Image (cartoon, rainbow, N blue to C red):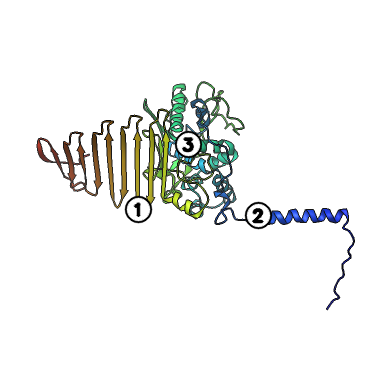
């Protein structure tokens, strides 16, 4: 046993006092680090930083924001817009792909599938150059995600606006790599071969005809120009990306598409809703706090309500569960008139009910149900009159169509009805 040390009672020196202060500061920092963020410590990718309230982006700035991706194939645009709402995950995914650059695609796809990322981020791992660009331009990526989260229709309109400008300038045309399908209301871009996808290379500030203001701090590397080409306003292509190894997973590129009619992104045949907690948002989609209960809630149901400038409201409520998807959209005008669109998908059936109620309280309803082998539609007018159309026997080569209305019932048989 050693002897018990004795302590002098002399006053501490200045150095001793400084050491005590430093030790106290370190101890306090350690204690703060041990305090949980909520009911449990969260992964870094789920921690939302305190950011300013979102402000609407005007059309001209949205055009500038989407310019770098507007000429990409439709499915890739959908993936990028969705993934941009998860910028911390994009950083993780890019680092992951870089570390495993030598890994064969089937093994990489399996490794990616095991990651806790959003499906849109997983899908982008098939396109390392795109993922790297999003990572290197993280401020722009975050802004793009904020815009899509809060102004999805406006962002989709901006993409189409830029495509129309490129088409008018002659820089967007069908090529051996991509099919460009022109329509006055929308321009669709699809790969010629769905198994090999080419990512366009272009200068986003000059390819659209009239110059587009350069997005601040956007890092752009000009691709090499083809022989004999003296202008930067051209669209080139890097080597095609073979995506076969990723197609068998539920998050692969074949599961993504934009719906240019409703101006939304579609994932696995349903409208995509971002569950991100890192975007600047108005809180439309439920409570994005970090409790276990809130995260569980956000995985199952989402509600968005927007109040129009004249007092009308738009509410979009969606519930997702094992094997089912429910969506109810309600629009209420300032005069009290309402329009409701309710959809339910699950167990091999798809049901859709649309209801219009005027300011006078009179209601009209259309109900449609799709099921294996057929479908049925019933319409009820504001005066109580009803009519229906039922199709049975689909898939058998012949189908029976029955119509019922005020004039009675008619039945006929035809081939391959639509």
What SS does tag 2 mark? helix
Place of residue 7 in the rendered image (x, y in percent of width and height, measured from the top left): 87, 67
In the rendered structure, the answer to whether residue 33 lies left or right of residue 83 reads: right
The reply to whether residue 146 is in sight is: yes
Place of residue 314 in the rendered image (x, y in percent of width and height, measured from the top left): 38, 35
Task: Give me the C-alpha separation between circle 2 and circle 3.
Answer: 33 Å
- Taking 281 as reference, is 292 above or below it? below
Of mark 2 and mark 3, the one earlier in the sequence is 2
Residue shown at 46%/34% (left/top)? 151
Residue shown at 48%/51% (left/top)? 294
As drawn, the label of residue 33 is 2
Q: Answer few, some or many: residues within 10 Å of disc 3's Cα (few below 14, many 20 plus, some between 14 and 19).
A: many
Quarter-wise, where is residue 308 in the image? top left
The reply to whether residue 180 is in sight is: no
- Camera-side mark, 1 or 3: 3
The quarter of the rendered structure image containing the N terminus is bottom right
What SS does tag 1 mark? loop
Residue shown at 37%/34% (left/top)? 262
Place of residue 60 in the rendered image (x, y in percent of width and height, measured from the top left): 51, 25
Quarter-wise, where is residue 32 in the image? bottom right
């Amino acid at each position: 046993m050693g002897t018990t040390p004795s302590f002098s009672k002399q006053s501490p020196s200045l150095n001793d006092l400084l050491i005590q202060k430093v030790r106290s500061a370190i101890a306090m920092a350690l204690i703060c680090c041990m305090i949980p963020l909520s009911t449990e410590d969260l992964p870094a990718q789920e921690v939302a930083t305190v950011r300013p309230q979102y402000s609407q982006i005007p059309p001209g700035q949205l055009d500038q924001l989407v310019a770098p991706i507007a000429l990409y194939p439709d499915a890739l645009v959908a993936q990028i817009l969705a993934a941009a709402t998860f910028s911390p995950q994009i950083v993780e995914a890019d680092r992951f792909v870089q570390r495993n650059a030598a890994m064969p695609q089937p093994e990489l796809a399996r490794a990616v599938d095991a990651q806790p990322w959003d499906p849109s981020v997983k899908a982008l791992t098939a396109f390392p150059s795109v993922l790297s660009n999003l990572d290197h331009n993280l401020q722009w990526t975050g802004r793009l995600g904020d815009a899509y989260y809060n102004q999805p229709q406006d962002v989709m309109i901006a993409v189409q606006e830029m495509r129309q400008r490129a088409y008018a300038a002659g820089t967007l045309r069908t090529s051996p790599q991509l099919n460009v399908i022109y329509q006055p209301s929308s321009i669709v871009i699809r790969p010629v071969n769905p198994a090999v996808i080419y990512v366009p290379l272009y200068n986003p500030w000059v390819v659209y005809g009239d110059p587009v203001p350069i997005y601040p701090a956007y890092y752009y590397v000009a691709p090499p120009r083809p022989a004999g080409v003296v202008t930067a306003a051209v669209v080139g292509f890097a080597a095609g990306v073979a995506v076969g190894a990723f197609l068998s997973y539920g998050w692969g590129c074949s599961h993504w598409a934009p719906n240019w009619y409703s101006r939304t992104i579609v994932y696995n045949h349903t409208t995509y809703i971002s569950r991100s907690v890192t975007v600047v948002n108005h809180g439309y989609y439920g409570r994005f706090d970090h409790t276990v209960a809130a995260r569980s809630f956000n995985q199952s149901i989402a509600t968005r309500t927007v109040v129009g400038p004249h007092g009308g409201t738009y509410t979009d409520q969606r519930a997702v569960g094992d094997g089912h998807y429910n969506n109810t959209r309600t629009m209420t005008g300032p005069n009290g008139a309402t329009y409701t669109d309710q959809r339910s998908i699950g167990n091999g059936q798809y049901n859709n009910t649309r209801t219009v109620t005027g300011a006078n309280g009179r209601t009209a309803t259309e109900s449609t149900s799709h099921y294996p082998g057929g479908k049925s539609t019933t319409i009820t007018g504001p005066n109580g009159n009803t009519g229906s159309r039922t199709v049975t026997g689909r898939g058998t080569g012949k189908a029976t169509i029955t119509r019922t209305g005020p004039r009675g019932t008619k039945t006929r048989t035809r081939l391959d009805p639509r």
